[in-house]
Image: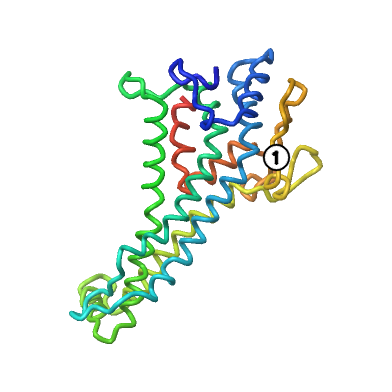
Amino acid sequence: NPIAWHNEELPAWAYEEYAVQIILYVMEWNADPLVKIGAVGTRVLAFVWRYAFCATLLLWVFWGLFPFIVTQFAACDEQGGFSQISSCFLILYVPVLALSLWLEWKIMAVKLPLEILSVGGWTIAGIKIPFVLYAAMQMCKSALGHLDLATNGIVFAEILHTASCPTSHVDEMWALVGKHSRFGDQLPHLSVCVSISYGLMVLQLILALYSGTPFYANNNPRVKQFSFWFWMEPPKIESKDDVPQSPYAITLYSWPEEVWAPELVLSLGHAGRLSMVVSRETERIK
């Protein structure tokens, strides 16, 4: 039963009915159980790839804009130290975080029945964890996992603003450190080093899009391009004949090989901080 969490049914808000119907019909096939579970994943996760894509893009747009917004509200330190930005500005992240968590749960509402089918309800040291507690724990973990981009953004903004403060002695102290290091006088200003480090974070997004976004099509009619994946809607499932085929994708990473929806969603999962989505994958693989 794909909605039985430790022999208790999931609440209606925790899953999508169409995903459950697809699972039930596919599990009637005369095939190896692992083949059937794989077939389910390639079908139901195709309809939520767009949520993973949007959540990832939303997060990284915030990453790019946030430091330059809060820099406008920074104040130079009178003692010549780092500029100060109130942590209250983290509240700007709240609507972004809320929308990101909502998008992530849209994915989980499809993926959760698949996880139950594969590994059952969650346990810790043999103790069965109630679903509501599990969901709350996963939501809190995901929320905390998102915060690194906001806190990194504030630190980056403080260092950027510090470089423009006439009373700051930070660059002098940084130069003194450089003289006693292997780099000597060749060490760039602190703001330059931090800007490079902050900018390198975007490699996470580039890798995710490189391996998790459909770009190409070929002669196979089941290989779909970006627009199809983004606007695809789940069908109304009334019989086994309504179960959709698995769409394929070709990414920049996989070209010319074809990949399925689970690969796309999971490729975006880490960069999008979708910890709920990826948290039980190790269990499923085992």
Which residue, as the protein is rendered here, is positioned at the far left? 79
Q: Amino acid at mark 1?
A: Glu
Specify whether 228 is left or right of 150: right
Q: How many marks?
A: 1
Q: Which residue is mark 1?
A: 233
Classify 10 Å Cα crowding around label 1: few (below 14), some (14-19), many (20 and above). few
- The quarter of the picture where residue 93 lies is bottom left
x and y, in percent, of residue 267 in the image: 54, 44
- Tell me the quadrant of the picture where the N terminus can be found: top right
The residue at 47%/44% (across/down) is 274
x and y, in percent, of residue 120 in the image: 46, 21
User: Is residue 156 positioned above or below 163 on the image?
Assistant: above
The residue at 55%/55% (across/down) is 57
x and y, in percent, of residue 268 in the image: 54, 46
Which residue, as the protein is rendered here, is positioned at the far bottom? 166
Specify whether 125 is left or right of 120: left
- The quarter of the picture where residue 43 lies is top right
Specify whether 264 is left or right of 138: right
The residue at 44%/59% (across/down) is 201
In-front residue for pair 68/98: 98
Q: Secondary structure at mark 1?
A: loop
In-front residue for pair 204/178: 204
User: Is residue 233 positioned above or below 3 on the image?
Assistant: below
The residue at 69%/51% (across/down) is 215
User: Is residue 186 positioned above or below 53 on the image?
Assistant: below
In-front residue for pair 178/224: 224
